[in-house]
Image (cartoon, grey):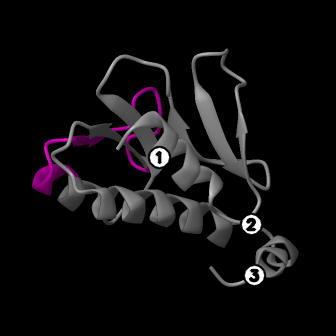
Amino acid sequence: MDPGAVRSLCLGFAEAVEVRPFGPETSVFKVCGKIFAIVALDAEPPLRISLKCEPDLVPALREAYPAINPGYHLSKRHWNTVTLDGSLGDELVHDLVEDSYDLVVSGLPKAARERLGPH
């Protein structure tokens, strides 16, 4: 998955925005002010994207896929850093990004969840 595809995927969710609070090299994707993905889109390949994950799934994902590792400079219990080196299919990457977005949305206040509508 190339940088353009990653950006399009992340911005394809309701009310998703891209900001750069850590400097021009790091894109942070948020929904309602909460982070669901962090990636340096202009970095040398392979891209690495940090995604929120259900804590119960973290160990199994890391064991099953060498490209999924503890979140870089993030809570290792809630975040994975996924290396987009081609070893994971685009469908799996899409599912991981979507799960991260959904997990963040599920923690939003009810009014925000209702405004975003069903995903």
Asked if residue 54 can be seen in this view, the reply is no
Of label 1 and label 2, which has the lower sequence position? 1
Q: Residues within 10 Å of mark 2 (few under 14, many from 20)?
A: some
Q: CA distance from mark 3 to mark 1?
A: 24 Å
Quarter of image, res 12? bottom right
Residue 117: give its label.
3
Quarter of image, res 47? top left
Name the element at disc 2.
Answer: loop
Of label 2 and label 3, which has the lower sequence position? 2
Residue at 61 percent of width and 30 percent of height: 27
In front: mark 2 or mark 3? 3
Locate residue 52, reporting x and y percent: 48, 52
Residue 108: give its label.
2
**Which secondary structure type mostly characterizes the magenta part of the structure?**
loop
What amino acid is found at the position of numbered circle 3 in the picture?
Answer: Gly
- Quarter of the image with the N terminus in it: top left
Q: Which residue is mark 1?
A: 5
Name the element at disc 1.
Answer: helix
Locate residue 35, reporting x and y percent: 64, 46
Locate residue 83, reporting x and y percent: 28, 37
Question: Closer to the camera, 8 or 80?
Answer: 8
In front: mark 1 or mark 2? 1
Residue at 80 percent of width and 70 percent of height: 109
- Quarter of the image with the C terminus in it: bottom right
Which portion, as a residue range, is magenta? Answer: 62-78
Of label 3 and label 1, which has the lower sequence position? 1
